[in-house]
Amino acid sequence: MSQTLNRLKESPSQTAGPYVHIGLTPNFCGISGVYPQDLGASMVNDRTRGERIRLRMRVIDGANTPLKDALIEIWQADADGLYNSPSETRGAADPNFAGWGRKPADMDSGECVFETVKPGRVPFRDGRPQAPHITVWVVARGINIGLHTRMYFADEANAEDPILQRLEHKNRIPTLLATRDGDAYVFDIRLQGDDETVFFDI
């Protein structure tokens, strides 16, 4: 006869706490000597090909307040549409472009600012070209599992993008579009509300 083992109950889930920043951005947290600079802090150098752009991103909660403890990672193709990955089979990516970045939110503004290049178009699984885009991963307080979304550029031709075409509610496409503001693209990731960003289950 089987017996109940109460001592083996599942542990309660926890929100992402300060260990996220301590582990991923130690220099930002004042912990020196782990890395010369936090991994993902720099994506480009003076030899990187392509149009240089600045991304200003914020994570906004349901009360329309920027989260000041958010952490954002981005992944993208280089200016020629090639990924800096061993899985890339279409050619060699720009060796002077990292292809990914990681930034904690500024404690005053809540912004994460990335210096990168505008990505080239990459093919969808069926070969159709996707619009230039950047994959975004977000963690912060209250988020148990990191959220995935995409950032497209409002000044690009996005109508034929295979992913955007699959969205059932087309009125939500603007939640994935970064707008130009001077020398930067601005992208707010809204966790709740009428303008909640589209997130992807990947």
Image (cartoon, rainbow, N blue to C red):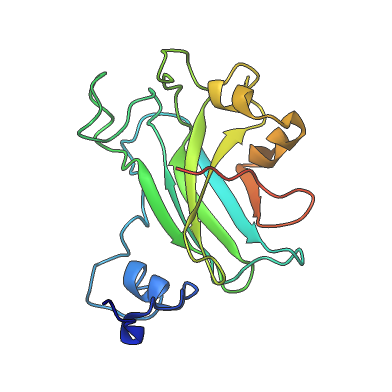
Going by the image, does 17 lie left or right of 196? left
Screen quadrant of the C terminus: top left
Going by the image, does 181 lie left or right of 137? right
Going by the image, does 79 lie left or right of 197? left
Going by the image, does 45 lie left or right of 18? left
Identify the residue shown where x is 42% and y is 29%: 50
Quadrant of the rendered image containing residue 40: bottom left
Residue 154 at what x, y percent from top left? Answer: 67, 31
Identify the residue shown where x is 68% and y is 29%: 168
Identify the residue shown where x is 69% and y is 33%: 173
Outermost residue to the bottom: 7
Identify the residue shown where x is 62% and y is 59%: 59
Screen quadrant of the N terminus: bottom left
Outermost residue to the right: 194
Residue 4 at what x, y percent from top left? Answer: 34, 81
- Is residue 177 at all visible to an observer of this figure? no
The relative height of residue 200 versus residue 111 in the rendered view (above or below) is above
- Is residue 61 at all visible to an observer of this figure? yes
Q: Nearer the viewer, residue 75 or 149?
A: 149
The relative height of residue 116 versus residue 114 in the rendered view (above or below) is above
Q: Nearer the viewer, residue 2 or 182?
A: 2
Residue 101 at what x, y percent from top left? Answer: 39, 51
The relative height of residue 121 versus residue 195 in the rendered view (above or below) is above
Outermost residue to the left: 86
The relative height of residue 26 versus residue 153 in the rendered view (above or below) is below
Outermost residue to the top: 127
Residue 99 at what x, y percent from top left? Answer: 35, 40
